[in-house]
Amino acid sequence: MKSDTRNKVESMIDVFKGLTHKEINNVVSLAKKQRIIKDSLEALFGVQIQTLKDRRCPKRITEILMQTQPRVVAKALKMRFKNDRIPFLPVIPCNYITVFSQMEMVLNENMAGYSSIYRSNTTPANPFSINLKIPEEPYYIFNIEDGTGTKSKCPNEDEIERQINKCDRVCLTGIEIIALAVHSDVLSKCRIIGMNSYCNEWGAAFPFLFVCGTKEPVLGYIYELNNCDERYGIPSRDRSVMV
């Protein structure tokens, strides 16, 4: 063990060559902080994968996502996050798992969610029209604000989009709010609207998630954002995604 430590120290000597003691201390301090952050990001990645496994996500999908771990963590390491932001989230497109099956992964007090957006028994894999270009493969979104930051305001569609676009961010899609609800407790704080999607069967209706009176998470639809109150929030994320 001592020999191993000595070898590591010797390997660092050239790295610090030409630096003052103060500069060396600063480098070591920064390296420690980066190591701690990286460890926490890797742990978050592992927890999210385990959540999907626990909720019976097909193995082939978790294997696809696990392959992206080094790149997802490396990208997140270069970003700065406010305390209330989620660094990253995995998103599973509808062509891999239907919206209706993914809603069963959304839990509240161990009660599985369901969709109420269809008036008949027809259950297409993708009930959404999406305003963004998103990957067809499972992908990651970054720097997510869960919607609690907008819930105290009356959601005016144009004004909120202006504010979010000004920060070079975008609102979440319908499938992305489901991912958010799978991996966080956001539904205990507010109802969340996927403002970058429309429900196909209901025209210009936005999908949203809420907890109903029987405690189950529900995927519903809403037409007029101006009728929303402080219970509703509009989540957003960075524009870039990673496959």
Image: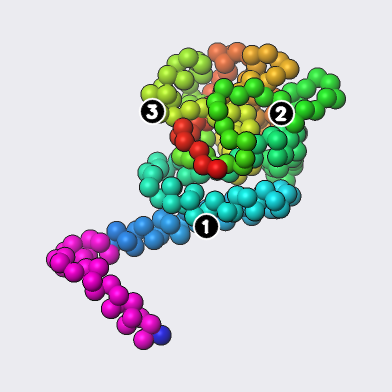
Q: Decide: few, some or many residues near mark 1? Use Cα within 10 Å; few <14, some 14-19, many ≥20.
A: few
Mark closer to the chain start, 3 or 1: 1
Left or right of 47? Residue 33 is left
Q: Give the residue type that dot 1 points to.
A: Ala
Q: Inspect the image, locate mark 3, and give the three-letter code of the amino acid beneath it.
A: Cys
Q: Which residue is painted at 62% across and 29% down in the image?
A: 174
The label shown at residue 43 is 1
Question: How many numbered marks are there?
Answer: 3
Q: Which residues are magenta?
A: 3-28
> Disc 1 and disc 2: Cα gap in Å?
31 Å
Distance, label 3 to label 1, CA atoms, is 28 Å
- The answer to the question of whether label 2 and label 3 lie on touching residues, with beta carbons closer than 8 A, is no
Element type at mark 2: loop
Q: Main secondary structure of the magenta part?
A: helix
Q: Which label lies toward us, 1 or 2?
A: 2
Q: Quadrant of residue 138?
A: top right
Q: Position of residue 154 (x, y in %)?
A: 50, 18
The numbered disc on residue 220 is none
Q: SS at mark 1?
A: helix
- Residue 227 horizontal/vertical position (percent): 58, 14
Which amino acid is tagged 2?
Answer: Asn
The location of residue 38, given as percent across then percent down, is 43, 57
Above or below, 219 against 43 in this view is above
Q: Which residue is mark 3?
A: 167
Per the image, the residue denoted by label 2 is 126
- Of callouts 1 and 2, the N-terminal one: 1
Estimate the x, y position of residue 225 in percent, counting from the top left: 57, 16
Between disc 2 and disc 3, the foreground one is: 2
**Above or below — where is 63 with respect to 138?**
below
In the figure, residue 118 lies in which quadrant?
top right
Residue 226 lies in the magenta stretch: no
- Position of 214 with respect to 232 (left or right) is right
